Amino acid sequence: MGLSKEEKKVVQSIIDTIDLKSLNIQLEGKVNNLILTEKTLENIAKWALDGKSQTEIRNNLELTEYEWEYLKMTCPTMLLLMSKTTAYADVVIAGTLVQTAIGGQEYEEETPIKVKDYDNGRCIGEHIEIIKVRKKTQPVPDLLKFLSIHKLSENFSDKPKTSSKEYRDIVNNLSEEERQAIKDANDNG
């Protein structure tokens, strides 16, 4: 599955800063059989969004450790691409978790109901109709407790990787488009 429209905007804004032609000339002979294209960079961003480590991304590109380090040194924007997409995913996940924990999101559910058929005030049978019922999600107290313990600033793991300040910086540095994309993702989730 590819990137969503919102994710593509984030990725494209970073890819647009890379001169692929010059970069490929620099990589020629140093990095085995790798020609960077927009599609390759989109794949790197997608793998980062999927939570793949740098080692897994390196393996997907079939690069040695030396080639990977040379690529990172030659194109530091690629590291920004991976970290920005990972940070974007973390914020979307955090928003979804908070909304799930708090509850109150509306959704539609189809439910069958029995409908009686009448003829001149007399019941002559019944049939089943499917109706849509609007419901609200219930709060999840255990998730609320988990989120309060981890303060939404740690990447929801046993060992914190991101401080509260770094998390706030990520959120504060999101563009209006990224904020709208997160809101849309949570509304559609």
Image (tube, helix red, strand yellow):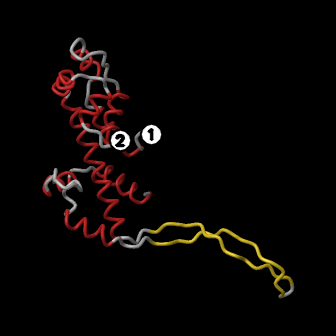
Residue 38's spot in the image, x, y percent?
35, 28
- Residue linked to disc 2: 9
The local secondary structure at tag 1 comes to loop
- Residue at 81% in and 78% down: 125
Answer above or below: position of 126 versus 157. below
Q: Amino acid at mark 2?
A: Lys
Q: Is residue 4 left or right of residue 151?
A: right
Q: Nearer the viewer, residue 149 or 49?
A: 149
Q: Is residue 14 left or right of residue 5?
A: left
- Residue linked to disc 1: 1
Kindly give the residue lying farthest to the bottom in the view shown: 121
- Residue at 41% in and 44% down: 4
Residue 150's spot in the image, x, y percent?
20, 62
Residue 22's spot in the image, x, y percent?
24, 18
Of discs 1 and 2, which sits in the foreground?
Answer: 1
- Residue at 29% in and 28% down: 59
Kindly give the residue lying farthest to the top in the view shown: 29
**Residue 13, quarter of the rendered image:** top left
**Residue 36, quarter of the rendered image:** top left
Q: Nearer the viewer, residue 173 or 26?
A: 26
